[in-house]
Amino acid sequence: MITSAQLFELACRHIPGGVNSPVRAFKGMQRPPVFIERAQGAYLFDVEGQRYVDYVGSWGPMITGHADPEVLSAVRSRLDAGLSFGTPTAIETSMAELICEIIPSIELVRMVNSGTEATMSAIRLARGYTGRDKIVKFEGNYHGHSDSLLVKAGSGALTHGEPSSPGVPASLAEHTVTLPYNDSEAVRECFAEIGDQVACIIVEPVAGNMNCIPPLPGFLETLRAVCDEYTSVLIFDEVMTGFRVALGGAQAHYGVTPDLTCLGKIVGGGMPVGAFGGRREIMQQISPLGPVYQAGTLAGNPLAMAAGIALLGKIRQPGFHQALAQRVDTLCDGLSERAASAGVEMLTQRAGGMFGVFFTGQSRVDNFAQATACDGEAFRRFFTGMLEHGVYLAPSAYEAGFLSSAHTPEDIQVTLDAAEKVFMAMAR
Ligand code: PLP
């Protein structure tokens, strides 16, 4: 039997760092990554035959669990018709109708191949629409790896200590203004100074790339208000929160409506898909209707559309998100109780179907400075201990955790039993 460690060594020969996306490398966890062979429901199975209860869910898409039979069957039923045509297909219209119905702020929507493409294109559109260059983002928010957005970013960029990447021209980065998350006053001050130069604000309405940080009351409302006052475009990056925090995303959950929304992850059911959409007046600026160029050889791929439509159909069932949030509560409350009885300082935060675990004595974590002040070594010990007990968490203290409807009460109990042992060991 070949082990994960051996496969990692082989991978490193021809793939930079052995991985095709940095956080997968387990860098900082002081051990090689686990190589997965297959997945089913709430479980991952590695190449050595070990089973894990999975709280990563392919970084978000697997909201009904892995290898969902209905999603697989939707893909299978289209397979024999061909993989891609480079022409319009009826299934793209079905997807667009579904998205616009579920998220009413989206009147027109364009499909792309990743979350990165969605945010990159939305930024270009906001710049084209307003004729302004500056964009405002928040420290520790991650919007993919396009140049304008890889400034003080979260996720892998933060995990690997390079929140602002070399290779981004200073002349481009100077158009990106970065403010502290959840700081309404800083937003107002910034707009009072340069509001008439700002094309857009882009924000994760729940920050999920510096652990899990929900918006403070009034924060999203302030963003809406300044964008209205200065005719800037408000972009919600709902690549992670879309269809997860609530069916209609964070905008439905918190009742604040953006001008443009970026989607990814769940919308593709596990296939490489992203989308951006919003107010008709703005979206009409996109080519071929308008002058702002955006395109994609494989965009709207029929197999990817089939997977996404099948998944969205499933999670539209009444009560789906309520049940998911209840599971998150059971998990987070259980973790908090066990940490407290072991004497480990730990805090959980949550929003709908996503959650975060912070090793800190603080009572809340609301921004990047507080997130990065948490105990990274305690997280590493927790992560490693949980992995040894068959629980797969994101290999970084700066990633949110995801639950699926496939996680049974027994799976959560297995997780809590493991956590009890790990917290006890950490307290020793
Ligand atoms: N935006 C957010 C909020 C994300 O969490 C991510 C990825 O995790 C992205 C954008 C980029 O998406 P992708 O990795 O599909 O390019």
Image (cartoon, rainbow, N blue to C red):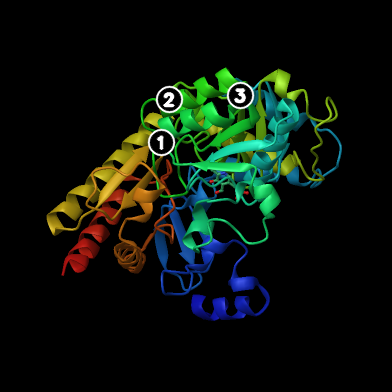
Identify the residue under disc 3: 259
Side of 138 relative to 119 (left or right):
left
- Nearer the viewer's eye, disc 2 or disc 1? 1
Identify the residue under disc 1: 182
Q: Amino acid at mark 2?
A: Tyr
Q: Quadrant of residue 17?
A: bottom right
Q: Secondary structure at mark 3?
A: loop
Identify the residue under disc 2: 254
Q: Is residue 318 visible?
A: no
| Place of residue 73 in the rendered image (x, y in percent of width and height, measured from the top left) | 63, 43
Side of 191 relative to 350 (left or right):
right
Q: Amino acid at mark 1?
A: Asn
Q: Give me the C-alpha separation between circle 2 and circle 1.
A: 14 Å
Q: Residues within 10 Å of mark 2 (few under 14, many from 20)?
A: some
| Place of residue 49 in the rendered image (x, y in percent of width and height, measured from the top left) | 45, 70
Q: Residue at x 65, y 30 (%)?
A: 197
Q: Amino acid at mark 3?
A: Asp
Residue that extends furthest to the front in the rendered view of this protein? 193
